[in-house]
Image (cartoon, rainbow, N blue to C red):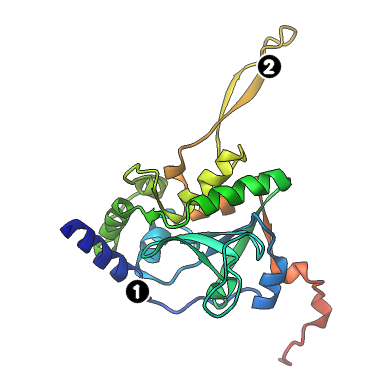
Amino acid sequence: MFLNWLSRRLAAYLSKQVAQHSVPTSTYEALEKALRPGDVLLVEGNTRVSVAIKYLTQSTWSHAALYLGPNSGLGISEDGEPHTLIEADLEFGIRPLPLSYYRNSHTRICRPVGLDDGNMRMLTDYALSRLGDQYDMKNVFDLARYLIQTPPVPARHRHKLLSLGSGDPTRAICSTFIAEGFQRLRYPILPTVDTIPSDDPSCRGCIREHYRIRHTSLFTPRDFDASPYFRIIKPTLENSFDFRAINWANL
């Protein structure tokens, strides 16, 4: 009972805003128009826990949400806006959200390539099945240490410090929740690639690549940005961008 109380208090503390949002790199209207079901929306957070995640991952991105679109069955917000996003939130667990929640945030769209209708149904069904699951508070306790002090951890090891958690399948953090959905489709994010001898008897010196899925606890928001299998979508460029139309101030 005490541990649950402490977890809730810690989650509320870590969720407090400590900085202003960065300037968005596109208009909200352009973002809304550019998004497609299956996209991963990365967010530069402005809370205490975001500071720890950005430090450990050496990345702009501290949060990730999955865009499923207005017809996904996520429901309607209190303001009558359709929920189009689903995310694992520190305080509220896995929940649906309207896109306008991140209206003023610095975001990036990472798009998987080649998903068909069957893949999207599987991804949507998985996401809906996780609604209400809780955030992995063991991971939060581990992250909280880095708000008290930022130890001189070599950059190459910081990513590993996020591969923590209780291992309870009903709990997740934002990136592991999304990564599990894509790995159920066998869609790669940052797989481990081994080179092994080819089984072609006519080419003894040849090698072939062998892909292995990484455990979902190893994924962070920046991995969707770094993945060679997700296309980066820039809403401003998707909307018939013409640099000649920019109204420059006279210098």
At label 2, the amino acid type is: Cys
Depth check, mark 2 against mark 1: the one in front is 1
Is residue 160 visible from the viewing direction of this image? yes
Figure quadrant of residue 26: bottom right
- Residue 150 pos. (x, y %): 29, 60
Q: Which residue is mark 2?
A: 206
Identify the residue at horizontal 50%, vertical 63% (top origin).
60
Residue placed farthest to the bottom in the image? 250
- Residue 245 pos. (x, y %): 82, 82
The quarter of the rendered structure image containing the N terminus is bottom left
Precedes in sequence: disc 2 or disc 1: 1
52 is higher (above) or lower (below) than 77: above
Task: Please state if 38 lies on the left or on the right of 9 as rendered.
Answer: right
Figure quadrant of residue 29: bottom right
Identify the residue at horizontal 47%, vertical 47% (top origin).
219
Identify the residue at horizontal 61%, vertical 37% (top origin).
186
Element marked by disc 2: loop
> Distance of mark 2 from mark 1, alpha carbons?
55 Å
Q: Which disc is residue 60 wearing?
A: none
The quarter of the rendered structure image containing the C terminus is bottom right
Identify the residue at horizontal 43%, vertical 72% (top origin).
46
- Residue 14 pos. (x, y %): 32, 67
Figure quadrant of residue 7: bottom left
- Residue 105 pos. (x, y %): 54, 74
Q: Which residue is mark 1?
A: 16
Q: Categorize mark 1 by other alpha carbons within 10 Å: few (<14), some (14-19), many (20+).
A: few
Element marked by disc 1: loop
At label 1, the amino acid type is: Lys
Task: Please state if 237 lies on the left or on the right of 133 as rendered.
Answer: right
211 is higher (above) or lower (below) than 68: above
